[in-house]
């Protein structure tokens, strides 16, 4: 790639994607499902328009089964994530939701597809779990909603859609 535009587009997308939990906290009386639905609609339309504009979109190369399953998982992610953020707060909901995704993907890969994991994956997984557990052990009085944690784990699991689509 000779142009730096793709790098800046990824950086912009990551900035917008990474602030949705915080943005939800500033929306008074907004339901997590409405925030997620709006995010899907705006993001999906923008990505579709960008793909058409860059002539990088072809209906012939799409597997209908994979597209439907990916859309289902993306739709599940939205209420799981935004409900988790609503119940547990931005920090815990985001860390558990996004932090659990690589762990679950690796575990699915190891348990279902029987692919061995490297020592680096095991070390990173253990550190990630310890880091998440440290969220619950602090000197301040923090109440964590177990249902919110389950929603965050559901959001993380919805990232594993590629393994389930095989």
Image (spheres, grey):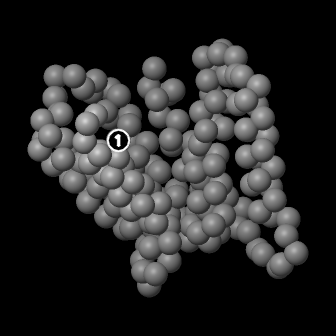
Where's residue 54, x and y in %?
14, 40
Most foreground residue, 47 or 81:
47
Pointer 1 residue: 71
Residue at the farthest front position: 2
Work out whether 49 lies above or below 58. Answer: below
Can residue 147 be seen at all in this image of the molecule? no
**Along the viewing direction, whichever of 114 and 17 lies nearer the viewer:** 17
Does 16 sit left or right of 45 as displayed? right
Dot 1, crowdedness within 10 Å: few (<14), some or many (≥20)?
Answer: some
In the displayed structure image, the side of residue 94 where residue 117 appears, left or right: right
Residue toward you, 166 or 55: 55
Q: Splitting the image into 4 quarters, where does residue 1 fall?
A: top left
In the current view of this chain or complex, which residue is farthest to the bottom? 28
42 relative to 28 in the view: left or right: left
Determine the residue positioned at 18% across, 33% down: 56
Residue drawn at (51%, 26%) of the image = 163
Which residue is at 85% across, 65% downward? 137
Q: How many marks?
A: 1
Q: Residue at x 39, y 67 (%)?
A: 35
Query: Is the residue 120 above or below the residue 156 in the image?
Result: above
Q: Quadrant of residue 3?
A: top left
Helix, strand or loop at disc 1?
Answer: helix
**x, y percent for residue 58:** 16, 29
Q: Position of residue 136 (x, y in %)?
A: 80, 64
Q: Is residue 165 visible?
A: yes
Quarter of the image that includes the C terminus: top left
Along the horizontal axis of the image, is 35 left or right of 147? left
Q: Position of residue 145 (x, y in %)?
A: 70, 67
């Amino acid at each position: 790639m000779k142009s730096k535009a793709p790098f800046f587009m990824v950086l912009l997308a990551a900035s917008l994607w990474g602030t949705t939990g915080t943005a939800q906290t500033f929306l008074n009386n907004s339901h997590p499902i409405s925030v997620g639905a709006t995010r899907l609609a705006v993001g999906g339309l923008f990505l579709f328009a960008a793909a058409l504009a860059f002539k990088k979109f072809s209906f012939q190369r799409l597997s209908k089964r994979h597209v439907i399953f990916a859309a289902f998982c993306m739709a599940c992610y939205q209420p799981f994530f935004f409900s988790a953020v609503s119940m547990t707060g931005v920090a815990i909901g985001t860390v558990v939701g996004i932090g659990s995704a690589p762990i679950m993907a690796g575990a699915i890969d190891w348990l279902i597809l029987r692919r061995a994991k490297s020592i680096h994956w095991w070390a990173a997984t253990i550190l990630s779990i310890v880091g998440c557990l440290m969220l619950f052990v602090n000197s301040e009085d923090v109440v964590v909603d177990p249902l919110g944690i389950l929603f965050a784990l559901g959001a993380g699991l919805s990232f594993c859609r590629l393994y389930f689509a095989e």
